[in-house]
C-alpha cells in the first residue's frame, strides 16, 4: 500500500507541472457549465421505466413538490483530469470514469495507456458506492464529460463511460440511457443484465443507437468469481436484446482490483476496435422482440376484457420492467385504463 501511495504521489507531482497548460494530471478541478442531458427531468425520462416514471410524477404532483432542474451544485464539486501531452488532429478520446471510492483519483499505472490512446480521463470526487446513483453518480459523470468536451477538442465518436466495481454498474446504465453521448462502456468487475426494472430498455431511437454504435467491453479478474458471474448474466442479456458489439478481456492473475497497465491497454484496444453490427441479423432479432411484446400486450387486453384488473396490472408491470420504453406509450395508457376501472 505504501509503495502504491508513493508511486501515485510521484506521478501526481511529475504530471501536475503541466496543469497550467491544460496538459497532464490536474487533481483538483472545478467545472461551471451545466448540460441539458444532466437535468433531473431528462435523467428520469431516460433512466426510469415508463410506469416508474409515471408513478414518480404522480407522487410529486400529489405532494406539490418540484424536482430541482439540476441535482448537482457544481460550485461544490471537484474532479480529477488527466490530459495526454499529444493532441491528435481529430481530437482527443474521452473516458468519463465512475469509481467505487470517494476520492477523485486516477490509477497511476493507467497514465501511459491513456497517452497511447490520446485519451482524456475525468472522474468526480464523492461519487463512490455510497453516493446516490440518479442524484449524484450519473449526473456527475454526464457533467464531467460535458465540461471536458467544452474545454478540449474531443472526437465525438470516441467518447466513453467506464467504471470499476459498483461504478462499472452505473457506467452500463449511462451507456444504455445515453448512447447519443457515449459510444461505448468499459466495464471492469461490475455489470448487470439489461431489460429489467433496474436497467430498463430506452426509447426505440436511443436503443437503436445503442445496438448499432455502442461498444461494450467487459474485463474482470479471473480470481473474482462473483463479478465474472455478473458479467456472464449481463452478456447473456445483451445478446438476448440483439446487442452484438461486445468484447471481453481476460485478466488471468487478477482478483477484484483495478487493472494493471497491460490489461487496461488490452481493454482500451478492444473498446476502440468496434466491429460493425450486421443490420440484417439485428433487424430479425428485434422483430422477434416486437412479436413477443405484441403477444404480451394481447394477454393484458384479454385480462382487462375478462375484468381481471389485478392480473392485468401485474402482467403490465412485468412488461414495463422487461421492455421499458419500447412498450410506451401503450403500457402507460393501459395502466391508466386499469386504474380508472378499479
Image (tube, rainbow, N blue to C red):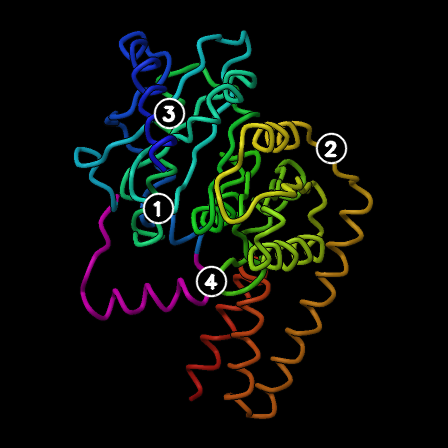
Cα–Cα gap, marks 4 and 1: 22 Å
Where is residue 154 shown, x and y percent of the image? 47, 18
Query: Of marks 1 and 2, which one's residue comes earlier in the chain?
Result: 1
Cα–Cα gap, marks 1 and 3: 28 Å
Q: Nearer the viewer, mark 4 or mark 1?
A: 1
Q: Secondary structure at mark 4?
A: helix
Query: 293 above or below 157?
Result: below
Q: Residue at x 54, y 28 (%)?
A: 261
Q: Main secondary structure of the magenta part?
A: helix
Q: Nearer the viewer, mark 4 or mark 2?
A: 2
Cα–Cα gap, marks 1 and 2: 30 Å
Q: Residue at x 52, y 24 (%)?
A: 156
Q: Which residue is mark 3?
A: 7
Q: Which residue is mark 4?
A: 50
Query: Of residues 123 and 300, which is closer to you in this image?
Result: 123
Q: Secondary structure at mark 3?
A: helix
Instruction: Tell me which corner region of the image, top left, top right, bottom left or bottom right, holds residue 249.
Output: top right
Q: Which mark is residue 275?
A: 2
Query: Of marks 4 and 2, which one's residue comes earlier in the chain?
Result: 4
Query: Of marks 4 and 1, which one's residue comes earlier in the chain?
Result: 4
Where is residue 318 shown, x and y percent of the image? 56, 74
Cα–Cα gap, marks 4 and 2: 32 Å
- 63 falls in the magenta region: yes
Query: Of residues 262 and 28, which is closer to you in this image?
Result: 262
> Badges 1 and 3: C-beta atoms under 8 Å apart?
no
Label 1 environment density (alpha carbons within 10 Å; few <14, some 14–19, many ≥20): many
Instruction: Tell me which corner region of the image, top left, top right, bottom left or bottom right, holds residue 44.
Output: bottom left
Query: Of marks 4 and 3, which one's residue comes earlier in the chain?
Result: 3
Q: Residue furthest front?
A: 2
Q: Which mark is residue 172?
A: none
Query: 293 above or below 207?
Result: below
Where is residue 12 shown, x and y percent of the image? 32, 20
Amino acid at each position: 500500500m505504501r509503495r502504491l501511495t508513493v508511486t501515485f504521489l510521484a506521478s501526481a507531482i511529475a504530471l501536475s507541472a503541466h496543469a497550467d497548460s491544460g496538459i497532464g494530471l490536474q487533481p483538483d478541478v472545478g467545472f461551471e457549465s451545466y448540460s441539458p442531458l444532466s437535468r433531473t427531468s431528462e435523467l428520469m425520462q431516460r433512466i426510469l421505466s415508463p410506469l416508474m416514471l409515471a408513478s414518480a410524477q404522480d407522487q410529486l404532483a400529489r405532494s406539490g413538490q418540484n424536482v430541482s432542474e439540476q441535482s448537482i451544485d457544481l460550485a461544490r464539486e471537484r474532479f480529477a483530469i488527466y490530459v495526454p501531452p499529444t493532441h491528435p488532429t481529430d481530437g482527443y478520446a474521452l473516458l468519463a470514469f465512475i469509481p467505487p471510492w470517494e476520492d477523485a483519483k486516477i490509477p497511476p499505472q493507467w497514465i501511459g495507456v491513456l497517452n497511447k490512446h490520446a485519451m482524456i480521463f475525468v472522474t468526480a470526487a464523492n461519487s463512490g458506492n455510497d453516493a446516490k446513483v440518479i442524484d449524484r453518480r450519473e449526473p456527475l459523470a454526464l457533467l464531467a464529460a460535458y465540461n471536458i468536451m467544452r474545454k478540449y477538442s474531443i472526437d465525438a465518436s470516441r467518447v466513453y463511460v467506464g467504471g470499476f466495481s459498483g461504478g462499472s454498474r452505473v457506467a452500463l446504465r449511462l451507456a444504455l440511457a445515453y448512447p447519443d453521448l457515449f459510444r461505448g462502456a468499459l466495464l471492469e468487475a461490475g455489470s448487470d443484465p439489461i431489460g429489467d426494472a433496474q436497467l430498463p430498455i430506452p426509447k426505440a431511437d436511443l436503443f437503436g443507437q445503442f445496438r448499432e454504435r455502442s461498444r461494450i467491453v467487459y474485463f474482470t479478474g479471473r480470481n473474482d468469481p462473483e463479478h465474472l458471474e455478473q458479467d456472464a448474466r449481463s452478456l447473456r442479456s445483451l445478446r438476448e436484446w440483439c446487442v452484438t458489439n461486445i468484447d471481453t478481456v481476460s485478466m488471468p492473475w487478477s482478483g477484484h482490483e483495478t487493472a494493471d497497465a497491460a490489461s487496461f491497454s488490452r481493454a482500451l484496444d478492444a473498446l476502440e476496435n468496434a466491429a460493425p453490427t450486421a443490420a440484417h441479423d439485428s433487424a430479425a432479432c428485434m422483430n422477434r422482440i416486437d412479436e413477443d411484446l405484441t403477444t404480451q400486450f394481447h394477454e393484458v387486453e384479454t385480462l382487462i376484457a375478462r375484468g381481471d384488473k389485478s392480473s392485468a396490472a401485474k402482467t403490465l408491470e412485468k412488461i414495463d420492467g422487461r421492455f421499458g420504453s419500447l412498450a410506451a406509450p401503450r403500457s402507460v395508457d393501459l395502466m391508466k385504463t386499469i386504474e380508472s376501472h378499479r
